[in-house]
Image (cartoon, rainbow, N blue to C red):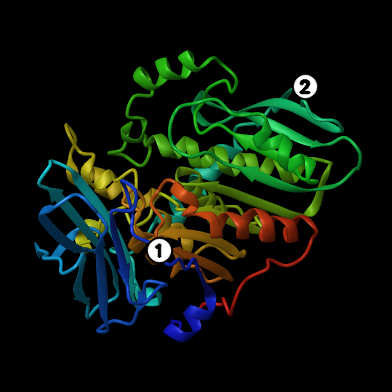
């Protein structure tokens, strides 16, 4: 494994002056004494808590710290002295810690702030071992997919941008399902680097600029729906699907690896990547996959199962460390561990192992860029670190100390600038991934 010093050369950290989640005009702010939020195991993290509620008298202030976002370490009351208080947290084992502070004022106001830190991030390990037949299962599923001809059907559309060609696309997938998406590329030119964009969670259509903007930069772009749905229907159509057939779609078939909703989704990504490699206008060299949240989950899975992916860019990826609660950590969305109502818990948790990003990560050989929010409770940082520590290729990890799951107040800004400004620019030009630091993970 990496030493912490080597890891820190490999981690690009978003450092801000104040990185607690702050609401109500900056009344409550949480900081740690390491601005990057990184400590070695057995070091002490010292928190400072500031109350700026002029004109509001604090009635009570409480705190709770949780290792891995789940296991309670400490809790109690906080007494401010001139609007200032301190706390200390120490962990002997590698993990993350989430601090939550709540203030109630005498006039009925309620305020909340959070802070996140990580101890020995290079040593966070998965909560369980990979299933022995993991590779055999996915080899069989890809064989099942390859037995179904793709039959890509392209429908020409208006790009609304000069010199950009645009199509809607539909392909066949396993078991009578389909892949639906959109394609764009520059009109001028014969060969282009390829970019596959995969989608975050929810049921919605695809926005045309998601492909045409990247095509304007010089990419051959394919953007696919996570679902077997047309891409450009009115919003009411997607609302009806979300309330009907796709209600709670992550739980569909989640007690069997053969029926999980994510089986079709993952294979959609594989086929989409394969389609790009078979186009005559691909340059034959660059094939990038990118996405955030559920899209980050699909990004890392695709990089793990498709051998021609040359780079993967994943923001706050979902699907990491599904059995995290067995190690006292909160699992990543879709949190199948808890999604067991009316099902056999053991079967659900066993099936989840075959869709867990942690178990695909060690198969990734291309450069990877990943953004991790230290206060993200949807896709908790410990699980993502457990996954990234399995990646044997080059990687850049961007820790976002004030990063929630949603990009509020530009909390994901450092990742976005690295992704869109540096990585995509270099990769489009055929240059190596512009990795910050020494990234190779030692065996």
Task: Out of 242 and 135, give the one closest to the viewer.
Answer: 242
Identify which residue is drawn at 56% across, 68% down. Answer: 395
Read off the residue under disc 2.
Answer: 158
Whichever of callouts 2 and 1 sits on the residue coming sooner in the sequence is: 2
Q: Quadrant of residue 223?
A: top right
Q: Which quadrant of the rendered structure holds the N terminus?
A: bottom left
Where in the figure is residue 53, as x and y percent of width and height? 24, 53
Q: How many marks?
A: 2
Q: CA distance from mark 2 to mark 1?
A: 41 Å
Identify which residue is drawn at 65% across, 55% down. Answer: 309
Task: Answer above or below: position of 20 versus 258.
Answer: below
Task: Out of 388 and 48, give the one closest to the viewer.
Answer: 48
Identify which residue is drawn at 71% across, 33% down. Answer: 183
Where in the figure is residue 166, as x and y percent of width and height? 76, 28
Task: Answer above or below: position of 128 versus 407.
Answer: below
Q: Is residue 302 visible?
A: yes
Please tell me whether mark 1 sits on a helix, a strand or a loop: loop
Where in the figure is residue 116, as x and y percent of width and height? 32, 64
User: Farthest front residue?
Assistant: 55
Identify which residue is drawn at 51% across, 60% down. Answer: 370
Q: Residues within 10 Å of mark 1 (few under 14, many from 20)?
A: many
Where in the figure is residue 111, as x and y percent of width and height? 22, 48
Q: Residues within 10 Å of mark 2 (few under 14, many from 20)?
A: few
Looking at the image, residue 363 sits to the left or right of residue 326; the answer is right
What numbered label is drawn on residue 401? 1
Task: Answer above or below: position of 145 versus 42.
Answer: above
């Amino acid at each position: 494994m990496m030493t912490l010093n080597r890891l820190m050369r490999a981690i690009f950290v978003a450092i801000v002056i104040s990185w607690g989640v702050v609401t109500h005009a900056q009344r409550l702010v949480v900081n740690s004494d390491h601005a990057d939020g990184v400590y070695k195991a057995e070091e002490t993290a010292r928190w400072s808590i500031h109350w700026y509620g002029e004109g509001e008298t604090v009635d009570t202030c409480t705190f709770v710290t949780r290792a891995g976002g789940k296991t309670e370490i400490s809790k109690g009351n906080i007494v401010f002295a001139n609007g200032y208080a301190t706390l200390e947290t120490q962990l002997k084992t590698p993990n993350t810690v989430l601090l939550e502070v709540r203030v109630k004022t005498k006039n009925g106001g309620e305020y909340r702030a959070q802070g996140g830190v990580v101890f020995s991030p290079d040593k966070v390990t998965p909560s369980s071992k990979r299933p022995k037949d993991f590779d055999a299962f996915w080899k069989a599923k890809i064989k099942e997919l390859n037995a179904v001809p793709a039959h890509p059907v392209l429908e020409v559309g208006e790009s609304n941008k000069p010199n950009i060609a645009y199509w809607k696309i539909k392909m066949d997938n396993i078991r009578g399902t389909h892949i639906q998406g959109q394609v764009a590329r520059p009109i001028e030119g014969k060969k282009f680097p390829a970019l596959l964009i995969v989608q975050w969670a929810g049921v919605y259509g695809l926005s045309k600029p998601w492909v045409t903007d990247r095509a304007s930069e010089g990419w051959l772009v394919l953007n696919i729906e996570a679902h077997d749905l047309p891409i450009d229907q009115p919003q009411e159509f997607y609302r009806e699907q979300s309330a009907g057939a796709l209600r709670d779609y992550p739980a569909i078939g989640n007690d069997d690896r053969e029926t999980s909703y994510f089986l079709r989704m993952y294979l959609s990504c594989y086929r989409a990547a394969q389609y790009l490699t078979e186009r005559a206008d691909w340059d034959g060299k660059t094939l990038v996959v990118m996405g955030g949240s559920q899209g980050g989950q699909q990004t890392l899975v695709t990089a793990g199962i498709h051998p021609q992916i040359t780079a993967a860019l994943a923001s706050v990826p979902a699907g990491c460390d599904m059995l995290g609660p067995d190690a006292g950590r909160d699992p990543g969305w879709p949190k199948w561990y808890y999604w067991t109502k009316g099902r056999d818990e053991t079967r659900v948790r066993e099936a989840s192992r075959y869709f867990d990003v942690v178990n695909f990560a060690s198969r990734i050989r291309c450069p990877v860029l990943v953004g991790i929010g230290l206060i993200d409770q949807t896709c908790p940082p410990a699980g993502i670190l457990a996954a990234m520590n399995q990646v044997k290729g080059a990687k850049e990890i961007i820790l976002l100390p004030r990063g929630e799951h949603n990009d509020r107040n530009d909390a994901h800004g450092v990742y976005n600038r690295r992704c869109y400004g540096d990585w995509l620019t270099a990769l489009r030009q055929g240059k190596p991934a512009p990795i910050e630091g020494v990234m190779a993970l030692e065996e």
